[in-house]
Amino acid sequence: MEIIVIGLNHRTAPIEIRERLSFQEETIENTLREASALSSVKENMILSTCNRVEIYAAVRNTEKATFELKNFLSQHHHVPLKEFERCLYAHVGEDAVRHIFRVASSLDSMVVGEPQVSGQIKSAYEMATQASTSGFILHRLLHRAFHVAKRVRTETQISNSAVSVSSVAVDLAKTIFETLQGRTVLLIGAGEMCELAAQHLISGGVEKVLVTNRTYERAVTFAQSFKGEPIRFDEMDRGLKRADIVISATDSREYLLRHGPVAKVMKERKQKPIFFIDIADPRDIDPTVGDIENVYLYNIDDLQKVATDNIRDREKEAQRAEEMVQDEVIKFVRWYRSLDRTPTIIALRKKFEEIRKKELDKTLALHPDLSEKEKKSLEALTSSIINKILHDPLTLLKKGQEETLTDLYVDALQTLFQLQAPEPTETEESSEETAGGVNERIGSNELS
């Protein structure tokens, strides 16, 4: 069997294509079973998010499976293959393992280091487990992917720095106030930018949301979405007196907040600190407001600069993460390729042992007068001869580094000795010992 990935993502396909090919969570179990019914597919799981649609599979024939899975996507969604085939990628073997490890580690995400994808993969794997479409290979592969993601998350700083304007604003607010718990935010404007920034602040712990807008009815509606309080535009000072954080994003052509009025508000607040986030273009807040004591003013350029610097930091950490992924890919592929050898080694040992035992039994039957000590000596002698005969070929198979050459050895042994090598299964816990330890343990954690 071989591991393959068939899919598309935000880099290869526009959202219109991704939407048409996405899978619904409520019907995913039936979909997984439909994919498993394909003649070339033995195991499969489906990862479907807003940014990617991918099928991970263990297959019997990569060329046939690629053809079948592409057509499966087309037929399941009733979308002609010609409309999206150019957007598809197909990864096989080591490339497939590397891709899955990179996705799990958020190295293939739109925003490198974002944490959501790890949870999305875990959910997809759980659904495949519930549908009984993931087996021995995918179980090991996905558990290893989770291990790699954890390594990247804990051993690098890839997820530690904010890379969006809104998340940078939250981080800056935390440096000013230490904690956002119990804080109040005033939104000036009721557009998408204000909404996004407010969502980040609320998730960071902000307790109260005040909303003001030129159109009061719009402020009321917008405030309801945050369980907040609307304030009339001509009463903005009342909101300023109560707010710890002010986010302004309107389409005003002139400053809405100027030095004098804000200084007056600060005096009435007894110099209690206030954090202004001006994400309007052109700006809503006079830059001189930032000169007032205990006023912290950042505009969209300031926030974008921090975000850009953080992106550069993430890119540096991503290089370290890529090295970790490659190291883990090598380890997994080495284990995976050993599965081709293990059944052959087991079958070869079994065949030689059966021959040894049969011939020994014949000899013992011809000499019934042998003592128990003599019988044990013959048993030890014949076992030693078999072990010495098998030592060199089995050592070559176990340590074989050249994949193509090792495959030739496996084929030759199976042909020469007419071996029927069993497929590895999840319950073959003793196969490692039976095969003389060919299935190596990877790092400090065994693949499990």
Image (cartoon, rainbow, N blue to C red):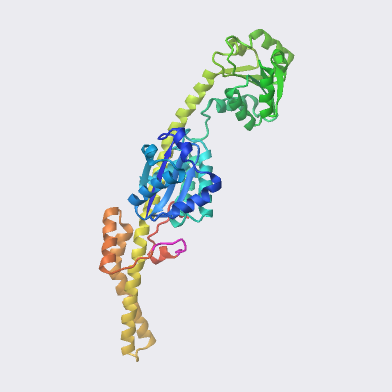
Left or right of 229, for residue 19: left
Q: Is residue 27 above or below residue 387?
A: above
Residue 85 place in picture, x, y as percent:
37, 39
Left or right of 233, for residue 137: left
Q: Is residue 354 above or below residue 237?
A: below
Quadrant for the N terminus in the image: bottom left
Depth check, front residue: 224 or 154: 224
Most common SS among magenta residues:
loop
Q: Is residue 428 magenta?
A: yes
Q: Can see residue 322?
A: yes
Q: Can see residue 445?
A: no
Q: Is residue 129 above or below residue 421?
A: above
Left or right of 255, for residue 415: left
Q: Which residues are magenta?
A: 423-429
Which image quarter: residue 411?
A: bottom left
Depth check, front residue: 45 or 415: 45
Outermost top residue: 260
Residue 194 place in picture, x, y as percent:
60, 23
Which image quarter: residue 205?
A: top right
Residue 109 place in picture, x, y as percent:
46, 36
Q: Which residue sits at x=72%, y=12%?
A: 267
Q: Count the labels in the image.
A: 0
Q: Is residue 417 magenta?
A: no
Depth check, front residue: 191 or 425: 191
Residue 400 place in picture, x, y as percent:
30, 56
Depth check, front residue: 318 or 127: 127
